[in-house]
Structures are given as structure tokens and as C-alpha cells.
Image (cartoon, grey):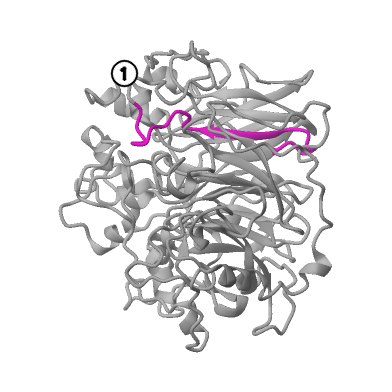
Amino acid sequence: MGQGFGKAYEPEEGVNTTGNPSIHEVDGGRRHVLRCTSAAVALLMGSHTLTGHAATAAKGKSLGFTSVPVSSADALVVPPEYEAQVLYRWGDATGVAGAAAPTFAGDASNSVQEQLLQAGMHHDGMEYFPLDKNPRHGLLAINHEYTDDGLLHSDGMKTWTAEKVRKSQAAHGVSIIEVVERGGVWRVMPNSRYARRITATTPMAFSGPAAGHALLKTAADPEGARPLGTLNNCAAGQTPWGTFLTCEENWNGYFSAQDKPTPDELRYGLRSKGFGYRWHEFDERFDAVKTPNEQNRFGWVVEIDPQDPTQTPIKRTALGRIKHEGATTTLSRDGRAVVYMGDDERFEYVYKFVSRDKVKPGGYRANRELLDHGTLYVARFDAQGYGRWLPLVHGEDGLTAVAGFPSQAEVVIKCRQAADAVGATKMDRPEWVAVHPNTGEVFLTLTNNSARGQGGRMADASNPRNDNIMGHIIRWREGKGQGGSGAFDGDASATEFRWMHFALAGDPNADKAEYRGTIKGDMYGSPDGLQFDAGGLLWIQTDVSTSAMHKGAYAGMGNNMMLCADPATGETKRFLTGPAGCEITGVTFTPDRRAVFINIQHPGETASERGDPAQPKAVSHWPDGPTGGRPRSATVVIRRKDGGTVGT
């Protein structure tokens, strides 16, 4: 979800005051400031191509479905060749074996104990794990990013209590559910031995270089080894050994800080004012004055084995502490794991982790320590379409005790500060990463950045538009060779890359040139979710905030949507539009590509981004219709009516 979990909930941005060299300075002092005219945009798109791209890219796919028009209707609209089924809504029973199956109360009167056995709120990233070699029987691991307490409780936040805090914490985290398709209809299996809810109070473990460090120790956990819970779980990833990586994003918004936050707290967005969740009023963990180290125990990638409900989720500290949007895992040429990650905030960075060891056969048991050892990098996007991965390693490139990094533990705990120090490139809200299944080419959404162009932080080659309210998608190919020499062959473990833009988002009819973009096909703005299917089609989901939707430059762009693009040609077609006030997020496929799962997050969200319990259906009554009690986030499964391949 990223940057706006609401005016009412708005997490403060971290203060990135670093004077990292701009792309212009990295390129030997030559000025390449783009004026955001139509000519400049055309120059950007045509100035270079990725070495070897034309020869190695997958053959273009036919997007055979009927493109849907933009929509402002309170409905989920899919192509006429397709059908959609609501599968798992906030408040639906998770199907935990031996447990009760509480039903959703339309007046939001479900108890904390019931919520612990029900789908959490605000579904986000998810992954599908097939079972029994059956593509249509599997597990869905689903993130629940945050809560709208105006809808979660019968009277909203009118009277705030410890019970409401516990219910909010229970509605966060992750669901693991067992699903099966029979006769074209999918269902959540009851009494499943796999099903479980992981919440903001679930016992977890630390591993990697920061485990046991003094900055992770609290009175409740003096060893610094057993954190409690996960929250603000945004995008996600699936590892080659079959585990789920869930990512903690805007965790700072849950803490109240001291009157004068430290520079390190400010860098991550902690402030002294009260935050929208108000957990700190009844849970001292989230009072940064009383429990100052608790904040350091969030902001991590958490690994979960979906096939073992007894496994303790593990926070993998080697991957760094940031506001993780996602964790997309691929393999290097020599079989090591490579994890790409975005830090979703304006002027933050792109990271990757390369494991020391190769992935072994044998699933999670054989690879349980793989993500604890390796090298963490941050990206520098240089001018003329080249870039370099800068290692974040204690003792290298100024990351020394004198600079505040006495060990690798401090490097990963203060990951943003380490990236500042080595000179990473400030990007326009790095979000989801997708890796092409055939070529290894990497795509990244940069959702938007209206502050680009302010305070001296001007447009540059990789972020080419000031007042970038529309966002863009960048692509790169990994390899070796500086200045055009060498082979950019797609080896994910390489320390250099060749980049270009895939699309600058926008409305082709916008008044301002910088809002029009370069999309080849159906328009969109604020790209967020991103995923390749096994056939090499690129799926793009949008997250236009409700405060911007249908207004200004977004007036003609409708509700949030999902599109499908052919990366070889750039052709882009709109596949679906969501109901009023929602974000489209989370996308995963069955192995046979006969079904795609997507999430509808916060339908009915108001411009203030907090629901009114007196009028819960003021904006939307999806998915339960006019007789339902309130709008509900939900997982939806979509298939072709003829049973064919999704995307055709």
C-alpha cells in the first residue's frame, strides 16, 4: 500500500537529508536535467536499449482478452470472457483445524477471539503454494496490511479501549488458508491442518547478523531473540524452496516517540505526536519512550513455512531493516538466492540480497539458514542507462565504527543510514519488483513522488519527471562490464546493470506533458503491484489514493485497476477495474495459469481514509451488496469461462 495509509493514519516519512550525488554528478558532472516536455520523454524512451534485449527477450504474447474501460462503478469488472468469484473476505473463517468457524458480524461486533480465527483486514500481497502436485489445490498465504478502525469496531474509535487494540492487532498479519477448485468453483477448506493466522502478537524469532544485538533487546526479551508479532505486511514473495516472505512496511506509524526523536528515529519517520492506531495507549511495546528498542524489532522480512503450522516465523535481519514493500526471490546463474526489495517511501532506495550459499533440494528444512548469510546491496542508477550495486558490508565504503557502524548488526538495523553513506540513488517510492521468468530482466514500480522537484531534489535520468504524481516502471538487466563493455546476461548476482524505462504512467490527454506518460495502450497511474506469470506476461496493479482518485489529473482515469502488458512490445491492456474506493493489490497464479488470485483492498475507503461507523457503506457496499453490513477487503479468484489460460 505504501505511502498513504491515510490522512487519519498517515505515517511520517523518514527524513532523508543526505547529499548523495545525483546521477548528473555521478556521470562526470555532465548535466542531463530533463524538462519533462514531450520531446524529453521521447528521448528517454528511445535513447538506448538493453544490451542483448532484442535477441534474448521472450517472443511477444497475444493479449487476447477484451480490454475493459475505465470505471467509477462500485463493482469489480472483468473482461466478458472471464468470471470472478469472491473467495476470502475480511471476517471469513480461516478454517483452522479443530477450531470454531465464527461468522462475520455485519455490525463489526466480532470479538478478539473470533477475529483470531477470521480473515484479517486489508488484504495485500499473497502467494499460492500448490499441494499434492495438483495445480488447483493449494495454500494461499495472504498479507493483512493494516486496519481501518472506523470499520473494525461497531462504534469505530469513539471510545478507545485495550480490547479494541487487541482486536486491531488480531486483524493484522498473515492468513494461511487451504483452497481447492471443484467444478469451476473455488472454496476455502474447513478444518485444514495447514490453516492459521499470524498476527501482531504471534511469537517469532530473529536470525542473521542482528539477532541478539543490544538494539533488539527489551525487558520482555532480554536476549533480543524473540520478537512478538508482525504488522503492516505489504507485498510479499515466494522462495524457490517453498516459503513465504512477508514484508513489514510502515511500521513506524504504530509507535509514539519521545518529544525530541533521535536522528535515527527521524530517519525512519518516528515522531512525537500521537499516531492513528493508538496502540501505545494500552500496549507499552508501542510507546517508544517506555520501550525504546521495540521499534528496532520491526521493519524486517519475515519467512514463514506455509506447510508447517508449527513453524515459528523468522525475521531475517540479513535483508536489512527498512519499510519493506516486497521481497522478490530469484536464482543466480550459480544457484544462489537473490532477493530484490524496495523501500516504499519518497526518495528511498532499491536493495538486493545475494546469499552466500546455493539453494539446496529439500525445501525449507534444507535451506532454513540460507537467508542469514550473504551480501546486502543498494542500487545506484547512473546516467546513460548504467548502474551499480553497492555492498552494505561492515568495514567497507565508510561503514565503520567511526561512522556509527561498529558491526554488520548496526549496518542492517540502520540500513537506511548505511545506504545514505555509500551514495545510493534516491528513487520515487520503490515498490514491487518482478523478474522475467525467461530473460531474468528485472522490473520495478516507482509509484509516484509529488515532492520530486522540491527542495533541490530535481528530476534525474531514472526519475525523469518533477511533480511525478503518475509514477513509472523501470527495468534493468544484470551483468558485468562498465560503460557498455561486457555482457549484461541477466545473472542476478552481478554487481552492475543496464537500465531503461518500461513506461512513464499517465493520461495521454492530460494538460501537462509530465502527466501524459509513454504507455503503449490503456492508460494508468500510480503503478504498484507487479508480477510476471509463468508465460512472461507482466501484470500491473494501481494504487491511486482515494484523496487523489477522480480529481485533477486523475479525473478521467477511474477506479484502481489491473492491467496486463507484453514486456517485449510494451502493449498494455486493462484487465479489470475495482469497486469504489479500493486498491488492487496482490496477484498470484495457479501453476497451470488457469486461475489468478487478486486482492481488493479497502473498498469503500473515504477521502480521509478512515471509515465512519455511522455510515460504513457511504462509498461502497462491495462485496456483500446493499444488505451487507460494511465493505470488506477480499481475495478474488478469476478464470476464463472456457477454462483457458489467463491473459489470453
For residue 485, side relative to residue 286 (left or right): right
Residue 499, position in %: x, y?
63, 70
Q: Quadrant of residue 46?
A: bottom right
- SS category of the residue bearing label 1: loop
For residue 132, side relative to residue 398 (left or right): right
Frontmost residue, 402 versus 264: 264
Q: Residues within 10 Å of mark 1 (few under 14, many from 20)?
A: few
For residue 266, side relative to residue 384 (left or right): left
Going 74% across and 66% down the picture, which residue do you hit? 334
Frontmost residue, 314 versus 556: 556
> Does residue 103 belong to the magenta stretch?
no
Going 52% across and 85% down the picture, which residue do you hit? 27
Q: Quadrant of residue 159?
A: top left
Mark 1 — residue?
614
Q: From the image, give the main secondary structure of the stretch colored magenta.
A: loop
Q: What residue type is labelled 1?
A: Ala
Residue 510, position in %: x, y?
52, 54
Q: Residue furthest left?
A: 259
Q: In this view, does 432 lie above or below 283?
A: below
The part of the chain drawn in magenta is 589-611
Q: In this view, does 241 lie above or below 192?
A: below
Frontmost residue, 244 versus 447: 447
